């Protein structure tokens, strides 16, 4: 029995949920979530739901959305689903296009209905909270993925609580690329309803700025990637910029999808274990880590074009933990807030 199995069997010491979550995150960082060569794990989706603080979802809630039929975004969804991870045999074998279409269509309906409610004055607009690390106040725990994971020395070991944010679904809608972001949830989940619950929680609370029409959160993230690279590897940053190679050219899919666009899929799942444990904002550091891993080839090229394939999750995580210590507080605060 793995360390994680033992921990989940015994539960948090003394029923201390905060300490239990800290231990869970530590175990994920050190040992990962046990899985087979295909990345399949009986525990993974439930740990993701826990880390995202996704409440239990009655299956009928999902089915009711499916029964509504084609959403206003249905044509856009169908234009994307058939080309989702087309070169990944593991994904194609486990997840059907119809399944992906249903989940995305249900998400589109949920966001559409919430927006209609706000437009007609039936619901109040959301109020986004601010992580404790930014305003110094104690707030009710929301999800480990949303809190500042920076300890007093800038390591990825903090335990500060945060307000992950209110229901921002009225501000978001279906955008191209959401199909790839949804794909790992469907691959890891044991049902469409589970995938829907995790995906909905992620885009509503962790990265609503990525799925608004203007995708301003993605553009903020791209600008931050350039700034972070300049800090952790000034020489590589100068070389890429001198060739006109800004993050907006090569990193847009990686920011939008938390690197789900980079195969192989089992490595994506390992990276997501880390991101959901310590915060999706760290994906920006993960992208920089991938650049540094191929720095020699980039520096030796007169026309550098970053190619992150194949994803090496463990190396990326190790680099990311190291880089987190080098990021100034003002920039780390922008990382925390950029996707909200």
Image: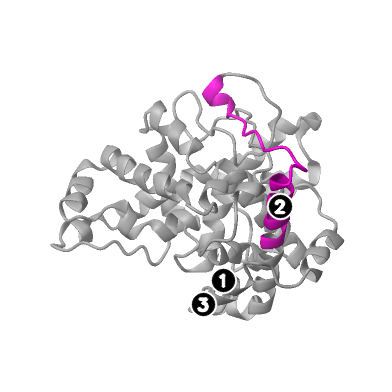
- Residue matched to label 2: 116
- Residue matched to label 1: 76
Which image quadrant for residue 63?
bottom right
Along the horizontal axis of the image, is 227 left or right of 273? Answer: left
The numbered mark, 2 or 1, whose residue comes first in the sequence reads 1
Q: CA distance from mark 2 to mark 1?
A: 20 Å
- Taking the spot 71% from the left edge, 28% from the top edge, the residue there is 140
- Taking the spot 67% from the left edge, 45% from the top edge, the residue there is 51
Q: In which quadrant of the rendered image does the C terminus lie? A: top right
**Circle 1 Cα neighbour tier, 10 Å, few/some/many (<14 / 14–19 / ≥20):** some
Whether 224 is among the magenta residues is no
Location of residue 127 in the rendering, given as x and y in whole percent from the top left corner = 65, 33
Observer-nearest of 72 and 30: 72
* Colouring convention used in this rendered image of the protein: one colour
Q: Nearer the viewer, mark 3 or mark 2?
A: 2
Magenta stretch: give its range.
108-135
Location of residue 244 in the rendering, given as x and y in whole percent from the top left corner = 20, 55
Q: Among all residues in the image, which is located at the extreme left? A: 302
- Residue matched to label 3: 83
């Amino acid at each position: 029995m793995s360390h994680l199995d033992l921990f989940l069997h015994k539960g948090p010491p003394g029923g201390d949920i905060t300490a239990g979550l800290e231990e869970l995150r530590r175990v994920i960082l050190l040992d990962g979530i046990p899985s087979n060569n295909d990345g399949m794990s009986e525990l993974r989706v439930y740990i993701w739901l826990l880390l995202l603080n996704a409440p239990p979802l009655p299956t009928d809630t999902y089915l009711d959305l499916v029964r509504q039929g084609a959403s206003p975004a249905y044509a856009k969804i169908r234009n994307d689903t058939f080309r989702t991870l087309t070169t990944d045999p593991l994904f194609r074998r486990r997840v059907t296009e119809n399944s992906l279409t249903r989940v995305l269509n249900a998400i589109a309906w949920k966001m559409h209905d919430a927006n209609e409610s706000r437009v007609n004055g039936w619901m109040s607009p959301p109020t986004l909270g601010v992580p404790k690390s930014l305003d110094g106040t104690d707030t009710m725990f929301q999800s480990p993925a949303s809190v500042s994971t920076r300890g007093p020395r800038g390591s990825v070991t903090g335990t500060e609580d945060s307000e992950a944010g209110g229901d921002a679904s009225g501000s978001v809608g279906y955008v191209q690329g959401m199909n790839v972001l949804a794909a790992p949830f469907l691959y890891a989940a044991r049902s469409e309803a589970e995938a829907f619950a995790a995906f909905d929680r992620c885009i509503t609370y962790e990265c609503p700025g990525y799925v608004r029409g203007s995708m301003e959160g993605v553009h903020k993230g791209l600008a931050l990637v350039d700034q972070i690279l300049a800090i952790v590897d000034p020489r590589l940053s100068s070389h890429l910029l001198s060739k006109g190679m800004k993050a907006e050219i090569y990193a847009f899919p990686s920011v939008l999808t938390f690197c789900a666009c980079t195969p192989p899929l089992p490595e994506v799942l390992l990276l997501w274990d880390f991101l959901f444990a310590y915060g999706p904002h760290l994906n920006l550091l993960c992208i920089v880590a991938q650049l540094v891993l191929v720095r020699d080839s980039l520096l030796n090229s007169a026309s550098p074009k970053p190619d992150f394939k194949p994803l090496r999750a463990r190396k990326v995580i190790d680099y990311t933990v190291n880089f987190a210590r080098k990021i100034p507080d003002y920039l780390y605060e922008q990382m925390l807030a950029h996707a909200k």
